[in-house]
Image: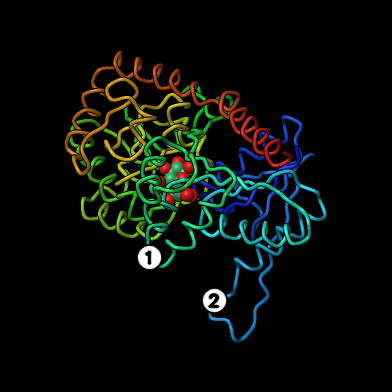
Amino acid sequence: MKIGIILYPTFGGSGVVATELGIALARRGHEVHFISYRPPARLEVITSGIHYHEVRVPDYPLFDFAPYETALSSQIVEVILREKLDLLHAHYALPHATAAFLAREVLADRGVFVPILTTLHGTDITLVGRDPSFAHTLHYALKHSNGLTAVSRFLKTETEKLFPDIRPIEVIYNFVQPERFAPVPTEKCLRKYFTQPGEFVLTHISNFRPVKRVGDVVEIFVRVHQKTPCRLLMLGDGPERPIAEEKVREHGLDERVFFLGHSVSPHQVLACSDFYLLPSDRESFGLSALEALASGVPVAGYQAGGLPEVVEHEITGYLAPVGRVDLLADNIAATFKNPQRLEEMRLKARQSSLHFREEIIVPQYEQLYHRMISKSAE
Ligand code: GMT
């Protein structure tokens, strides 16, 4: 199949999933065309079967806001006409579903029909999508998408509540490559650069947006640290990083917390971690939590959003009501004091991640593509 993938090229979860999906599809013999304004961050090399088409938005003194969506639609039309794509897969609805819709209309006018699949990732529905500024056009684009998927049951339900008249939404979970995210022997990981012997490592990875509650990450760390010697690794960057840094300073723990930015890859940091912290308000899935589990690292987070579909309380991590940093910290500290329990959780974490491995999830997208393409040919 020839598949067009529209995505955000950043380190955000939707862009990562879209990129990994494209790479996996190319490995399975398909031709993949990424369309975005920058090469996708997780696309380390462009190998055979992978193409990248950049969207350029010309500047003009009149524009306070350059019309990206119009340029994106136009580039989609151009790529489809030139490359004869079979299907267009839009990741994150805003503005990708609306741009794809407009492109499909333009193509229909020229006698070309290409089905659109939209994958909803989370904040495109739970936060930004429900804003009245976007809701009407987003609703229309989703209603007229030829297929819809959500990355968790939670997100499917949220979308159905918001837009009750849209077509059936299929749940296709996010996936992980268990060869890349895998437990690593202590002597081969980065642990020695951050810790003294006998210390534990807590890790958080995100875009430091308010939904991630990075203040809670620090609060959990402070409480665990009072009971067990440990360090905190914070990977990624975003608007609330200064808040987290300030909190760390207030507690006088600067030397125990490392803000790494994007300097190392998530799999390297996870490989030297003992517990992963993801206390988001509402995480539609929590891709980084899955990557932690695959690395053999249990996860602590809240009983909210789709995280309970990924993390099993007391088996592969701990879940608590939103804001209960005390409960999460007590559980983690108790686990650190019980090496056998920690080892059991590590093994269970790795095992449970295998249900979400690439070979299980990617064929679900392939089957859906086949169904949509056959239906559009009828
Ligand atoms: O806000 C973010 O964390 C990024 C966001 C995105 O759309 O890029 O992540 C969402 O999509 C990920 C991939 O499907 C999910 O794993 C995340 O849970 C989801 N984020 C939220 O729902 C907050």
Which residue ends up furthest to the right in the rendered image? 82
Residue on which disc 2 sits: 65
Seen in the picture, residue 77 relative to 71 is either above or below; the reply is above
Residue 48 lies in quadrant: top right
Q: Residues within 10 Å of mark 2 (few under 14, many from 20)?
A: few
Q: Viewer-proximal residue, 329 or 39?
A: 39
Seen in the picture, residue 106 relative to 232 is either above or below; the reply is below
Report the label total.
Answer: 2
Residue on which disc 1 sits: 132
**Looking at the picture, how far across and down is residue 311, in whole percent?**
35, 28
Q: Secondary structure at mark 2?
A: loop
The C terminus lies in quadrant: top right
**Looking at the picture, how far across and down is residue 96, in whole percent?**
57, 56
Separation of marks 1 and 2 at Cα, in angstroms: 19 Å
Q: Secondary structure at mark 1?
A: helix
User: What amino acid is found at the position of numbered circle 2 in the picture?
Assistant: Phe
Which residue ends up furthest to the front in the rendered image? 378
Q: Are marks 1 and 2 in contact (CB under 8 Å)?
A: no
Q: Return the disc, 1 or 2, that comes first in the chain's sequence.
A: 2
For image coordinates 22% across by 45% down, the residue present is 219
Report whether 172 appears left or right of 30.
Answer: left
Report whether 327 appears left or right of 206.
Answer: left
